[in-house]
Image (spheres, helix red, strand yellow):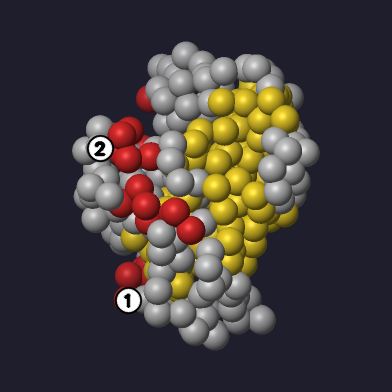
Amino acid sequence: MTDPRGAAASAERRAGPAVVPPVVGLRADDGATAEVHRHGAHVTSWRPAGDAEDRLYLSPRSEFGGESAIRGGVPVIFPQFAAEGPLPRHGFARTSLWSLGGIAREADGTAEAQFVLRDSPETHAIWDAAFKAVLTATVIARQLAITLRVENVGETPFSFTAALHTYLRVRDVAEATVHGLRGTRFRISGDRALHADDAEDLPVRDYVDRVYVDAPSRLELRERDRSMIVEAEGFPDAVIWNPGPERAAALHDLEPGDERRFVCIEAASVQTPVTLGAGRQWIGTQTLTAQ
């Protein structure tokens, strides 16, 4: 089910207390694979069954560990989207060390890993909420599913925004379009004014940073000879992002020209914050299907 690092984690769980590896590898019975870093509960690699090429983009300049977020893969945005609030940009989940909740192999050959983040003195210093967040990554055949569950384990309600900031690898962004957004209202990230998108397809040839409100649950990233189906459940919004060449040049952890190698399609809940009462939970899932 796992690569040597993931297998070691399973062995350690059976043998008793041991050092949990920083990266967990998953391998389904059919050969589909994924890798997840405990730093950020961050999925950094996904190869569908039968594919030699990774379908997620990961920057060669990514920094792992410490206070930096990994550039690429699927960053977990929680409990704040972007700079739309008083917390650090995109919240603290993507730079926190998550606990390994477990690794499992299902009867159908699916490989699954679960990661857990709880409130701590460090989180209470900037966000006074008693919470438990659980990230589950599941891989089988041509699909990768990522589920984020947030629970209120305290006695006081709290509100949050969240997203799965998925970097989908493309061969050339100039030939990539996002299909399925026609008729959906959107705003530019950081702005609240809404606009209508009347185009059949959204090209991503330059800088784009849009929050689509009440977005369709099924979108498609189309390239010349392949596509990616992006489905969301529990996430009402979608974010489409690419920095474009000018803004990409200012990102120290991105190789020159690598903005041409990805399109971010994010399952999101950002327009209207989620409010959880005591003992309540929220669940959102993004499922990727490689075509």
Q: Nearer the viewer, mark 1 or mark 2?
A: 2
Label 1 CA crowd tier, 10 Å (few <14, some 14–19, many 20+): few
Residue matched to label 2: 249
Where's residue 61, x and y in %?
Answer: 22, 50
Q: Which residue is located at x 26 percent, y 45 percent?
A: 254
Secondary structure at badge 2 equals loop
Q: Amino acid at mark 2?
A: Ala
Q: Is residue 168 above or below residue 196?
A: below
Secondary structure at badge 1 equals helix
Q: Nearer the viewer, residue 186 or 267?
A: 186
Q: Is residue 18 above or below residue 10?
A: above
Where's residue 248, x and y in %?
Answer: 31, 38
What label sits on residue 4 in the rendered view? 1
Is residue 213 visible to us here? Answer: no
**As drawn, is 229 to the left or to the right of 256?**
right
CA gap, disc 1 to disc 2? Answer: 36 Å
Q: Quadrant of residue 277?
A: top right
Decide which of tag 1 and tag 2 comes sooner along the chain: 1
Q: Which residue is located at x 52 percent, y 81 percent?
A: 49
Q: Nearer the viewer, residue 91 or 201?
A: 201
Q: Amino acid at mark 1?
A: Pro
**As drawn, is 169 to the left or to the right of 17?**
right
Q: Which residue is located at x 62 percent, y 26 percent?
A: 187
